Image: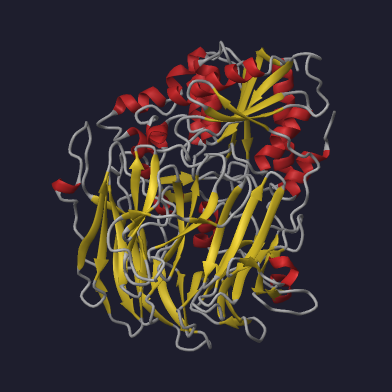
Amino acid sequence: MNSPDLPAQFARTHRFAFGVPRGFTVSRDGDRVLFLRSTAGDDPVSRLWLYEVGGGGADGAERMLADPLTLGGGTGPLPEAELVRRERAREASQGVVAFAADAHARVVAFALSGVLWTVRTDSGAPRRIATAGPVVDPRPSPDGSLIAYVTGGALRVVGADGTADRALAEPEGDDVTYGLADHVAAESMGRHRAFWWSPDGDALLVARVDTARVQRWWLSDPAHPERPPRSVPYPAAGTANAGTTLHILRTDGSRVGVRTPEKVPEAYHPTDGAWTDATLEYVLRAQWDRHGPLVTLQTRDQRAAYVLEVDPESGESRMVGHKRERPWHDPVPGTPVRLASGKPVQHWHVDRDTAGLRVHNVKTPPGLHVREVLATVGERVWFTASEEPTDVHVWSLSALDETGEPFRSVRTGAPERVSDGPGVHTAAVGGDTVVLDSRTPGGHTVTVLRAGKPDGHIDGHIAVLSEEPVVVPAPRHLTLGERAVRGALFLPSWHTPGSGKLPVLLCPYSGPGVQLVVHARAWWTVVAQWFAEQGFAVLIADGRGTPGRGRTWEHAVYGDQLTPVLDDQVDALRAAAELHPELDLGRVGIRGWSFGGYLAAGAVLRRPDVFHAAVAGAAPSDLRLYDTHWKERFLGHPDVQPEHYERCSLLPHAHQLSRPLMLVHGLSDDNVLPVHTLRLSAALLAAGRPHTVLPLPGASHMVAREDVAANLLNLQLDFLKKSLNA
């Protein structure tokens, strides 16, 4: 059976992302929900919308607040800093792609092609605000009277009425910026912000980033030799990071530097091992609530974190929490955070394989693996957690007993589950309103709950306008091998058991931070089913190193990110073949992107007895060339532990290639730079090993061009069919 329309649909809808509501922000009183969404599944232009909880009208509770096509914006040139921000966020939409609001969701700010716009949710049309230069990351003060933004590396504020634009901090040199996250913060730490308003709106906590010490790499587009190369400050493993310091900038123009310790005291930091570095080099997390600024710093070796309260008047800081862990410390996203009373919400280890939460004196129970803290409202915390790795649910837990009093001694609480049914659920919360964002086997829904019940208008649903895929995935969820690897097997809808053998295609990522095998329909499950319809048995497996299975599972790749991961793919493949004898182990291909591409190339180099062809996209072939925070976490310092990097490098194994291998890489990729594929190809050529290289001019780590994305799927299919005689 053929499904020729899927690649075109996949590309046209940008992996079925257009038309999907996202970026939910709920007002403090729970009456208003702001979000982004385009008008259809093939519409790339994102608009700003308001859902009024309990609101009426002929069209229900949704109302468009800003349409960039009527504002004449969103299609012009973008500031360089905005291009970088979008690449770090993997943002492919046009129009309004980000926004921020005041605490009550009355004033909303956004940028279109560097122009600042504001709109009020209670009345009026969007208003253009004159600024000193192209705007990046505009954010209203909590009361909505001021808008802070970054331009030219300076942090500025302007009145919401367009008056009194002024700089609070200007860069002291070409390598300095205020209010912009550096590369590793945005790419590897998940921190995309670099300034935070005080609750009273009279000051901001701002990160100053200095990249003077960071080595410069140069990216050019060979398809356009007339364009000059672009300079990228890229801190490769073992080299200098950007210097990040914090400052309190007051709206009256005064400022004070935040004084933090240079190193973690020895008592709070593991000192064993080949490499330790207690320097507090990373600003992992920052916020400013009613109890003051709260900052989390992390050591260079990532074995310890230090939580600091900051006095906004003097800039002095004091330690209020610390964590240490071998081989690395990886906190639950969203922690630490404080309840309205100031009591801390912190993560703790229920056991070696379960991350839990401690909400003042209440702990989450054993067996509930916490994924992320979403919000705190009053003395209640909202979070996502799993009882089974392939499902993620939304839960809440109160620090108060039945009488409304805080628990006086430590106890195990009984969290309340908000979401229902198999799937991956998350939420945004404000007041007693919960916006439940659910991806399930049947698709994607967004439900607005008020006091635990669906909002009365249009059944409490925010419309999801994405296209329905022309191929409907039908995965068979499996638990495979002695390590109980979670897997999903996709067979052709037309295949009858016993009718013949099927060539096998593995489509893993199987790297840190990404979980593919879940009870939810996603773009990768649709693509897997499409490959299945072309005559393959497609297997996706999440091995050691992937999230959702606890610290032992994740830490198993320390010092070697290839061998255990590859072993799990082999074990999962063989276990799946025992359950489904139609899998032909004499014809096995593997394809992947980024870490998945690295794994695919490693598979045919290291295990040609199992894997007979591979497509490796954006594969990091030499991990010394990846960034500090991401690679040093798993492999340590390359000058101290070079054997870890040598063990994981693909280059020394180039002479072993005996199977068909296609290497694909975007030539504008500033995450996994093209040098990785070029060096691997050069090593293969030097060893006399035939291979295929497919360069993608102008493409970054995210392939966004419609024609390229569609044809890339078809080219992979043709390569795999020929290579596997399928």
Would residue 345 be found to the left or right of residue 655 on screen? left
Question: For this rendering, which residue is in front, 625 or 499?
Answer: 499
Q: Nearer the viewer, residue 17 or 484?
A: 484
Look at the image and tell me whether residue 175 can be seen.
no
Question: Which quadrant would residue 336 be assigned to in this image?
Answer: bottom left
Q: Compared with residue 54, is residue 22 higher up or lower down, i.e. above or below?
A: above
Tell me the colour scheme of the image.
Answer: secondary structure
Give coordinates of residue 81: x percent, y percent.
Answer: 49, 61
- Taking the spot 52% from the left edge, 39% from the top edge, the residue there is 389
In the rendered image, the vertical position of residue 481 relative to residue 115, given as above or below: above
Q: Position of residue 553 (x, y in %)?
A: 42, 33
List the single residue furthest toward the left.
266
Q: Which is nearer the eye, 651 or 124?
A: 124
Image location of residue 260, percent across then percent down: 21, 61
Which image quarter: residue 329?
A: top left
Find the residue positioned furthest to the front: 403
Q: Does residue 359 sit above or below 669 in this rendering?
A: below
Quadrant where the image shows the N terminus: top right
Q: Looking at the image, which residue is at 52% across and 28% down?
A: 485
Total numbered circles: 0
Which residue: 74% across, 54% down?
466
- The spot of residue 565 in percent (x, y) is 47, 26
Residue 16 falls left or right of residue 624: right
Q: Quadrant of residue 324?
A: top left
Q: Is residue 554 visible?
A: yes
Quadrant that contains the C terminus: top right
Q: Residue at x 45, y 88 (%)?
A: 164
